[in-house]
């Protein structure tokens, strides 16, 4: 939450230069409160020059004191903490020249309040808290006597609440902030209430309630947009920290990129440095340690210039983590822990963490993150040693950053292990204190990881697996509190390394296939375990989705007309960000279903075979459950397989247009078939003896989500179901169909759809036909079978805005995931809507994934572009077979077998 400079009582009327100074001071206070300290400093220095120098009198002296108090905050923000404190010292000396009375008493309290604010911003939180306690006591007395106004008291309470948050005292902070909200509502102070709400968001973050934190920040930002738009840069920092804690690195980076532009322009030194530090954390999650180190270095220099010692030490920790991430494993490298560093410099304040497996670029055109060459492997090793990390831990402890000190010690543990010194690592680990009640989950996971790595180093793999098991269970309890698909998926990043360690131990050990299966189910696609609950109705969210739909059509039309679209695209991007944020705290999820075991899956499989793929290091393997047995099979280099998948995907996309020339079509088809044969040889060849001609349940990993499985020669015409996890498949298979309604939806600008829909009406004479988005959503809710034929688009960098194009605009995946009762079976006769953005833990987000997570049992969709004619022919055959009683996966296999390269549809779910 942005800090608030101490509020000053109204100045008595004076004349000449004093009048000018009073007017300038009012302008300056508004600028400082609105997040523009540089502007405030300019105005306040002019105000000082306007005051009489000789024989100033009581009124002029009082005005000078007020100006100095406000100037102290501005100079502390834009220049240095010492400059600000020097101004306060002068103000305090001048107060001694005033007659004793309510004005002098009130001004002394405000000086204390302002001094506390400056010290808090500099990271000297313990000193600040003692001063706030004294200041608030005096101001409460003044409020009771009528000498102090609501704004002055509320300001002190807001700032003391902020300091209590930073000191790890959420209960005390909340008491202050609830009092502020009551005062603000009674005295009509909406901006003060908004600042208190933003601080409540920080408290919710501190206590691990991410959805509530985001909801508070959203409420506050709405007010800031209207009353104090210059505070938006600061609130973006706060929200970004929450996103980082939830594992949403790309979203946080985009927020911070926007904030950095504003903060650099307004010269807000402390906030700018904090934003750079948070952006460094996001870069580290995005596997970009070079940028992380550069940004952390910039932030460190700014903090040092301001005299913010504890913040500077935090930046040192970030730089060390970036160095650790660039070192080779033998020298001290590997991922740099699982925490991008604390961002509030006192107490047990949460710090975001994790590593994102598939990073995306920041939004084009954002000039705020400096580009930097990748740091060569091993360069960081010279800068990271256990001794250096231990010294940093001692410095962090000295300034009260206990959680961050533990992080530095844990880095030292990992460095010692990389150097082959488990004895030193154990000694270092023994000095790390046990987590406290509000220690953030990223710190807890890193502690578990260090314990597990040490156990491996000393030859105790069972102990390592126990640490992993307990750590992932702990992470699951955190995930249970999340809302929205994004947050549920993002949380997996915190346990990524711990899960990989456990899976690696099993795969590299005695080859126990059942143990490998169990660990894969614990570590992948956890979002699909949750029972979906009806979304919370939110009129603001509904309006923003409607605006996004309208604006999407406007962008599309502008492109067709060859008009500029940049401004429209920027507005659409902003709207979609807001829709995503609102969804985080209005989409709720029920209890997680238990992870299934081998015995349960075997019983449900019957004559089918389940193939669960896993990549560890650069080795791709498959766990196969078939005929009551389990087998672990090594397949080859994962990087080569994934590259082959991408090449096949490109060829199948190229074949999609209906009117390719025979020459081009023949050449591309020949290339595609060659790639399909090679991929089939690698993926299915080693499994042929195990699975025979059985129906398959496939659990993919990474790029394998994009495979059109029936294209592989050995799988032509074979019923195949693709599922995010065996647990998700078992839950979907176990569901009992109850609905009867069939829904048919046709989109615009598809000539082939006219005949397709006519045929389907004959097949399903009682079907409900819908075209507009609102009617379609209403019809989908609780349907048995839904067929949607329309143009589709998978949005890779914002998967929940993948959409179908309907007559009045796009139907977003975000909306499909919020239905009260998801349709049981969905057929998406559109391009590419089976594609997913894969987050850590194989959490797949996209249109089909949103439907499955929302409760649909089965989704049929294409993993590639597909021609209108090929789609219509596939669907005509598919639905005829369904109507004749064929099971869905059998009908799809037969419908695609005629021309698999042009019919890349896949059955997902059950």
Image: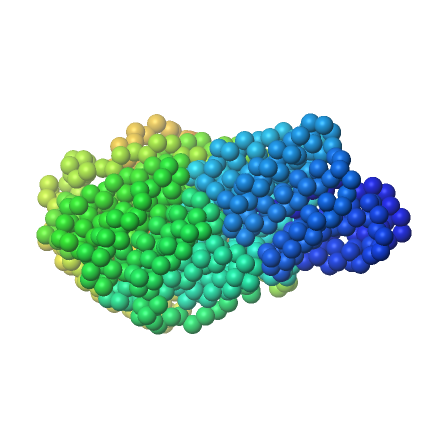
**Model colouring:** rainbow
Which of these two is toward me, 258 or 772? 258
- In this picture, is 335 found above or below 105? below
Which of these two is toward me, 448 or 553? 448
Is residue 385 visible from the viewing direction of this image? Answer: yes
- Residue at 74% x, 29% y: name it: 146
- Residue at 19% x, 56% y: name it: 423
- Residue at 27% x, 47% y: name it: 448
Residue 888 position within the rendered picture, expressed as x and y whole percent measured from the top left: 29, 41
**Which corner quadrant holds the N terminus?**
top right
Q: Is residue 115 left or right of residue 900?
A: right
Residue 539 position within the rendered picture, expressed as x and y whole percent measured from the top left: 58, 35
Residue 177 found in image quarter: top right
Is residue 492 visible from the viewing direction of this image? Answer: no
Q: Residue furthest right?
A: 16
Q: Is residue 844 left or right of residue 241?
A: left
Which of these two is toward me, 265 or 525? 265
- Residue at 48% x, 69% y: name it: 371
Q: Is residue 12 left or right of residue 315?
A: right
Residue 435 position within the rendered picture, expressed as x and y whole percent measured from the top left: 33, 42
Q: Is residue 604 left or right of residue 177?
A: left
Which of these two is toward me, 775 or 295? 295
């Amino acid at each position: 939450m942005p800090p608030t400079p101490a509020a000053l009582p109204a100045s008595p009327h004076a004349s000449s230069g004093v009048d000018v100074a009073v007017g300038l001071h009012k302008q300056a206070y508004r600028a400082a409160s609105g997040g523009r300290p540089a502007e405030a400093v300019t105005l306040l220095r002019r105000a000082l020059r306007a005051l009489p120098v000789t024989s100033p009198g009581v009124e002029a002296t009082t005005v000078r004191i007020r100006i100095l108090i406000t100037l102290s905050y501005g100079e502390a923000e834009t220049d240095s903490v010492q400059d600000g404190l020097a101004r306060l010292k002068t103000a305090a000396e001048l107060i001694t020249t005033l007659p004793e009375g309510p004005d002098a008493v009130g001004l002394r309290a405000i000086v204390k309040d302002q001094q506390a604010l400056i010290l808090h911003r500099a990271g000297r939180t313990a000193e600040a808290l003692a001063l706030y306690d004294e200041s608030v006591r005096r101001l409460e007395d003044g409020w009771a006597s009528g000498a102090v106004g609501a704004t002055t008291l509320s300001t002190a309470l807001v700032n003391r609440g902020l300091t209590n948050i930073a000191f790890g005292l959420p209960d005390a902070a909340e008491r202050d902030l609830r009092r502020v909200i009551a005062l603000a509502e009674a005295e009509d102070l909406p901006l003060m209430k908004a600042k208190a709400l933003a601080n409540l968001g920080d408290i919710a973050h501190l206590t691990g309630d991410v959805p509530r934190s985001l909801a508070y920040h959203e409420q506050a930002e709405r007010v800031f947009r209207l009353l104090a738009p210059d505070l938006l840069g600061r609130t973006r920092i706060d929200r970004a920290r929450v996103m980082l804690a939830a594992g949403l690195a790309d979203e946080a980076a985009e927020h911070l990129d926007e904030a950095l532009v504003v903060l650099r322009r307004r010269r807000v030194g402390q906030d700018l440095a904090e934003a750079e530090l948070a952006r460094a954390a996001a870069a580290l999650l995005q596997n970009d340690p070079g940028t992380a180190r550069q940004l952390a270095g910039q932030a460190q220099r700014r903090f040092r210039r301001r005299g913010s010692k504890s913040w500077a030490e935090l930046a040192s920790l970030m730089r060390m983590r970036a160095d650790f991430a660039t070192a080779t494993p033998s020298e001290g490298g590997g991922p740099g822990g699982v925490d991008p560093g604390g961002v509030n410099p006192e107490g047990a304040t949460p710090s975001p963490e994790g590593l994102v497996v598939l990073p995306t670029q920041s939004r084009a055109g954002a000039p705020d993150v400096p580009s930097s060459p990748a740091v060569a492997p091993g360069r960081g090793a010279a800068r990271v040693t256990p001794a250096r990390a231990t010294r940093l831990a001692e410095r962090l402890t000295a300034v009260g950053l206990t959680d961050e000190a533990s992080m530095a010690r844990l880095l030292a543990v990992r460095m010692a292990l990389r150097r082959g010194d488990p004895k030193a690592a154990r000694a270092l680990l023994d000095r790390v204190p046990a987590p406290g009640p509000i220690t953030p989950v990223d710190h807890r996971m890193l502690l578990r990881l260090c314990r597990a790595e040490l156990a491996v180093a000393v030859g105790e793999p069972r102990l390592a697996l126990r640490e992993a098991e307990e750590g992932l269970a702990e992470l699951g309890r955190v995930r249970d509190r999340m809302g929205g698909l994004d947050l549920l998926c993002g949380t997996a990043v915190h346990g990524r390394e711990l899960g990989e360690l456990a899976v690696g131990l099993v795969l590299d050990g005695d080859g126990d296939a059942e143990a490998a299966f169990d660990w894969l189910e614990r570590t992948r696609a956890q979002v699909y375990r949750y029972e979906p609950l009806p979304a919370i109705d939110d009129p603001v969210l509904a309006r923003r989705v409607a605006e996004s739909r309208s604006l999407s059509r406007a962008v599309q039309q502008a492109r067709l007309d060859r008009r500029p679209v940049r401004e429209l695209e920027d507005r659409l991007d902003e709207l979609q960000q807001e829709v995503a944020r609102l969804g985080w705290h209005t989409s709720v999820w029920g209890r997680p279903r238990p992870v299934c075991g081998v015995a349960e899956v075997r019983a449900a499989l019957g004559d089918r075979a389940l193939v669960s793929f896993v990549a560890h290091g650069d080795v791709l393997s498959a766990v196969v459950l078939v005929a009551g047995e389990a087998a672990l099979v090594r397949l080859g280099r994962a990087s080569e397989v994934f590259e082959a998948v991408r090449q096949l995907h490109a060829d199948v996309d190229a074949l999609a247009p209906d009117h390719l020339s025979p020459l081009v079509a023949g050449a591309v088809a020949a290339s595609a078939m060659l790639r399909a044969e090679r991929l089939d040889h690698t993926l299915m060849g080693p499994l042929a003896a195990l699975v025979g001609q059985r129906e398959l349940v496939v659990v993919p990993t990474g790029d394998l989500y994009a495979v059109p499985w029936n294209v592989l020669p050995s799988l032509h015409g074979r019923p195949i179901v693709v599922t995010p996890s065996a647990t998700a498949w078992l839950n979907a298979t176990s569901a009992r169909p109850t609905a009867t309604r069939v829904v048919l939806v046709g989109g615009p600008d598809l000539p082939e759809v006219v005949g397709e829909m006519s045929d389907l009406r004959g097949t399903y004479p009682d079907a409900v036909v819908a075209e507009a988005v609102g009617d379609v959503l209403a019809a989908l809710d609780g349907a048995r079978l839904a067929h949607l034929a329309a143009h589709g688009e998978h949005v890779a960098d914002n998967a929940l805005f993948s959409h179908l194009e309907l007559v009045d605009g796009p139907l977003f995946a975000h909306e499909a995931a919020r239905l009260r009762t998801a349709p049981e079976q969905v057929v998406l006769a559109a391009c590419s809507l089976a594609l997913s953005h894969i987050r850590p833990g194989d959490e797949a987000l996209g249109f089909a994934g949103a439907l499955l997570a929302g409760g649909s049992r089965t989704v049929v969709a294409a993993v590639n572009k597909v021609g209108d004619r090929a789609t219509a022919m596939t669907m005509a055959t598919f639905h005829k077979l369904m109507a004749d009683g064929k099971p869905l996966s059998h009908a799809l296999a037969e419908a695609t077998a005629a021309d698999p390269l042009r019919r890349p549809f896949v059955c997902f779910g059950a």
